[in-house]
Image (cartoon, coloured by chain):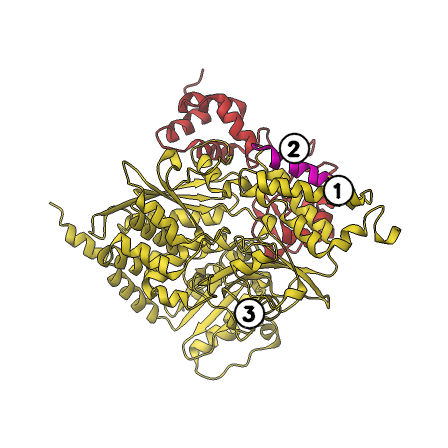
Chain colours: A yellow, B red
Amino acid sequence: MVDMAEIYKKFDIHEIAKNKLAEIEKYKCNIYCCHSTGCKSSGSDDLIALIQQILEETELTEQVRIVSTGCMGLCAQGPLIRIEINGKKDILFKRVDMDTTRAIMEEYVIPSLKSNEEITLGDNLTQHILSLDLPFFTKQEKVVLKNAGHIDPEDITEYMARGGYLALEKALKTMTPQEVVEEIKKSGLRGRGGGGFSTGMKWELAAKVPTIDEKFIICNGDEGDPGAYMDRSILEGDPHAVIEGMMIAAYAIGATSGWFYVRAEYPLAVERLKKAIQACKKHMLLGNNIMGTGFSFNVDIRLGAGAFVCGEETALIHSIEGARGTPRPRPPYPTNKGLWDKPSCVNNVETLANVSKILLKGADWFASFGTETSKGTKVFALTGQVEHSGLIEVPMGTTINEIVNEIGGGVPQGKKLKAIQTGGPSGGVIPAKYMDMPVCYEELKKLGSIMGSGGMIVIDDSSDMVSLAKFYLDFTVDESCGKCAPCRIGGKQMLLLLDKINRGRGKKKDLELLKKIAFAMQKASLCGLGQTAPNPVLSTLRFYEEEYTNKLLDGKDKE
Amino acid sequence: MDNEPCLGCRIGDKWRKKRGSLIMALHEIQGAKGYVDWKDAVALAETMDVPLARIYEVLTFYNFFKLVAPGKAVISVCTGTACFLKGNDKVLERFKSELNIKEGESTPDGLFHLQVVRCVGCCGLAPVCVVNGKTYGRMTPEQVPEILNEWREVFKEA
């Protein structure tokens, strides 16, 4: 007979973490190479191979550890390499190429290991140094991204060495499912996919539905917003955090299995997630009787296929079932009738990534970040016309000014900030005059935009708002599933009107018509896509109406 | 008839018993062939016991699936917001004029296929293009001929 106790001991997470920490301790120098989609596409694979080769040639492999990490954040400056040598200040190098890598190794790493003398770096290297004291780094508050850029996402032991799966252990061994739900409710965590519904409440609803034969937890990784890549970076940089969050959610609501729905356009995220799931199975963290607690759970991955509407939960469920991704009216909500008509709880990637931290550090700690109604931190993809474009995480309630001008370093090339856009094709613009507005669910809504999944696009004064609105509408019209008339027909008609205005053929009454159709779409569309599709137009009309009227035949200038 | 089971049968057989697997099976066919062949779709319908009409509606609903063979080098021009703001439309125009095709088309010699894609998630590198999985960041229209020549060389050698 196999002694189960022996087997569980072999996979004891504390033991594995301890051993890994002892192993890391042995190295004098750690080289962290960003290995996420952004840096990978600027050639970080070759750099890692080169460093490995140099270490082998110089027989330093025992002293230096190379870690291929997830996103370090400053994607525009990639490939990024961070060097941490015992007793020295960490250095981050930007835009590293093969020659620079060789120089870093030969002029900095190797001499540092051979002698204790202070090393003065030459111009060839100093021009690649990115100060870690930049507000971009110091102003951020990393909760979800705590591990990204610090661990090898493909190595489960590294995750454990940084406290991974301790929250799961705590939940399974010391808490009842109700207590887990209560803790999440107390933390004030809200859905990070855009809607902002209380996660604890959702879990409570899902937990209340009796599990007859099956109940599902689904992770929504269908991040279709153009200009947003938070979920991709989380899955690439710290996949285990999402899996752990999902397992805790499953325990809390009584789910029997889990599904990851990830965009097919994110091959690296899918690959890392697959590896992470395999590692969990190997370490008996997925399967039957997890940690000997009697809790059993399994997960599977399903890929999207390029349909933006599949981010909507009922459409997503149809897509997993192998059908067209069209939404259906709610209620019944998926928590009652979801995947294969079984109760299902759909949570976003970032939401789940928050869960383990809340359980470990407590709801009060989590609630100490943010505003009265929006707790915790939020990851944003800060892109567009901004100096430091990249992935950032800030406490809720941070002002736009802090995000764009301090962390983002402002608008480049002497241009002026005109507005920011949040919420992607479902959101709106926020003009520069509201710079001191704290970013949270309610404030953004007041100005006609939404939090969305976290894309924040910086727009400078050279951009034309009518074209921008048309760009977004183009997107939603193309992505409309065609099921309900308001979205299918309304979107198309709005687009035709915008096109007419943009070509200088529009009249004043067209603006009125635009608003009318927009109102009908908001009220009558079946799902969030149609209801929010007019937002970019309405919001640009609200703040930049003169840009529209200037283009009209009977507009201001022409009267 | 040869005994080798066709691609559609083989993949259909693999996914038949798993739930919610139609899209995964189609991904696998496209991954192997570059597109989903009519014959494979028929075979898949039979092995997985899914109506062919269902497969067709799924194939045509999702942007990702192709029904005809694309060119050898698939050029994807990102049309995400960051790329839009940084002028990827000019890059797209240049590709169109250099290759003399529209988006969604292949060159007559079957070498290039031009398509526009939604955000590829490399917004920090905008504007971005991807050719057969290789990403080109901070693109300018001037780089277009260079990239085309690079891929012409690749397929000349092959």
Amino acid type, label 2? Gly
Picture quadrant of residue A245: bottom left
Side of A33 relative to A494 (left or right): left
* Chain designation of label 1: A
Of marks 1 and 2, the one in the foreground:
1
Question: Are dots 1 and 3 on a single chain?
Answer: yes
Residue stretch rendered in magenta on the structure: A483-496
Can see residue B111?
A: no
Residue highlighted by disc 1: A499
Extreme residue toward the top, this view? B1
Of marks 3 and 2, the one in the foreground:
3
Of A523 and A425, the residue lying toward us? A523
Side of B80 relative to A161 (left or right): right
Whether tag 1 and tag 2 are in contact, CB under 8 A, the answer is no
A276 in the magenta segment: no
Amino acid type, label 1? Asp
Residue A330, above or below A207: above
Check residue A81 in the rendering and tell me which mark sits there, or answer none.
none
* Chain designation of label 3: A
Residue at image point 37% right, 28% down: B16
**C-alpha span from label 1 to label 3:** 39 Å
Check residue A136 in the rendering and tell me which mark sits there, or answer none.
3
Side of A14 relative to B93 (left or right): left
Check residue B110 in the rendering and tell me which mark sits there, or answer none.
2
Residue A486 spot, x, y in % from top left: 61, 36
Of A457 and A4, the residue lying toward us? A457
Extreme residue toward the right, this view? A559
